[in-house]
Image (tube, rainbow, N blue to C red):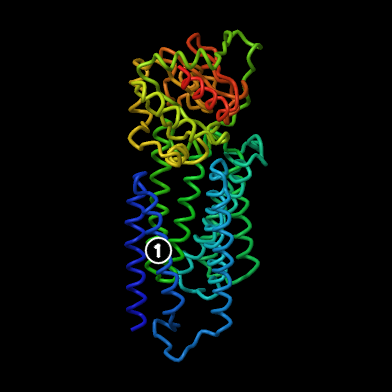
Amino acid sequence: MKTNLLEICYLIGSVTFILGLKMMGNAKTARKGNLIGAAGMIIAILGTIVLFQKKEDGIVDINYQVPALIYGLIAGAILLGTIIGWMTAKKVQMTKMPELVSMFNGMGGACAALIGLMEFHNNIGHTGASIAIVLSVIIGSISFSGSVIAFLKLNGTMGQPIRLPAYNILNTLVMISVFAFGGYIVYNHLDSNMILYALFGAAIIYGVLFTIPIGGADMPVVISLLNSFTGLAAAFGGFLYDNKVMLTGGILVGSAGTLLTLIMCKAMNRPLSNVIFGAFGGGASTAGPGSDAKGSIKDIGVADLAVLLNYSKKVVIVPGYGLAVAQAQHVIHELELLLEERGVEVKYAIHPVAGRMPGHMNVLLAESNVAYEKLVEMDDINPEFEQTDVVLVVGANDVVNPAAKTDPSSPIYGMPILEVNKAKNIIINKRSMSAGYAGIDNLLFYDPKASMFFGDAKKALTDLVAELKTM
């Protein structure tokens, strides 16, 4: 009876995961989908705890009783984790969300690795289970250490990418060695703590080596890829325990992360191998303005910009990480509504890797109730720039840099960009002339049609809205 009820709980959990993931594909239903998936996870967890039955060689031991201490430890762990997760999620700022996602993903990888470490000695001689365990340890450890490095990069603790000599060859050799070592352990049915922890340590080292050379422009892709690793590691845990909901959840996370990674790579016109082995976006900064004959820059004041926008017919806003840092998503929406009241058509141009994680700008603008249909993807908005009166770039940098198309020596050469340089007027809001996350100078600043609108995005846009209201 308990077994049947538990299978039903797992079936409900699996269905809610699929439904929740489907609903997350649309901004209007994403919140509801997240809650449905969370409800399914709660059902699966409670079912596992309450309906647990010990099995020996597939036979249920009806006399086994879980010690009260174990239930107490589980309840305590759930309570502690819930409190930490709830408080962290409530307090985190939108600019820190990528770091939080990366760290939570790393914890998932660590859990998968720990499961493998705990179950290793119980499955010596069972080839299928041993393969699942070894892969769970390797992939989970890579995801954990890689996510920690990604977290340090995103919060600024770790600055420029670290390139060891011949790092491509070194990383490839370490990767092959780690998986070969794991295969050696399974093939010879080795039962040694020292060997097991050596595998764990080697995978941790590879996760670090894999992530440290990656440059800023590739961080959204790397986060997505590491997320798929965590899902894959969890799926191996589900295979080990014959746990349907764990297997389903892991497959969904792994496949969704992989598909998202491939989609972003396609949008950047780069194969995944180049992201992993090419350390894209981490080149040295080019010379700053004034040190080269790139041209001069000009700035624009609030009054002049207000007049320009007020008499425009079409305005496209390009949001970037600077918008998130300034927490200016609400005032940008206010500007949009104000312009629309005056008959101006307003759209938002979204680059696939804008921000610090996949979908960062979509989430940011959804928070301020920007209509989902106003968010236009790169391939759809690029043909419209020639008919655009004003492009307002707020905090974006690398995703609008013409060097990606014109400078073969640039680290971002070949990456598709938002072609804002085709618009009639280009307004760039930044606090300074500093380089973007990829660490290179932006040639757009020197375009004859471009004007710099200096200042913190929230304050500058607030002043702009106030000026428009007086007109």
Q: Give the image location of residue 137, x and y in percent.
A: 54, 61
Looking at the picture, tell me which residue is in the foreground, 288 or 371: 371
Q: Is residue 352 above or below residue 87?
A: above
Q: Quadrant of residue 246?
A: bottom left
44 over 95 or under it: above or below: below
Q: Position of residue 251 (x, y in %)?
A: 39, 57
Q: Is residue 148 visible?
A: yes
Q: Is residue 174 left or right of residue 318?
A: right
User: What is the tally of numbered marks visible in this picture?
Assistant: 1
Q: Is residue 388 left or right of residue 306?
A: left
Residue 188 in the image: state x and y as whole percent.
Answer: 53, 68
Which of the pair 251/85 is nearer the observer? 85
| Above or below for 90 versus 458 | below
Instruction: Quadrant for residue 153, please give it.
Output: top right
Q: Extreme bottom residue here?
A: 63
Quadrant showing the C terminus? top left
Q: Using the image as rendered, state which of residue 122 and residue 118 is in the foreground.
A: 118
For mark 1, give the secondary structure: helix
**Quarter of the figure with the N terminus:** bottom left
Q: Residue at x 53, y 57 (%)?
A: 109
Residue for badge 1: 39
Q: How far from the left and from the top, in percent, is residue 360?
A: 47, 40
Task: Tell me where residue 169 sits by quadrant.
Answer: top right
Q: Residue at x 46, y 65 (%)?
A: 237
The three-letter code of the residue at mark 1 reads Ala
Residue 142 visible in image: no
* Left or right: residue 246 compared with residue 147: left
Dot 1 crowding, Cα within 10 Å, few <14, some 14–19, many 20+: some
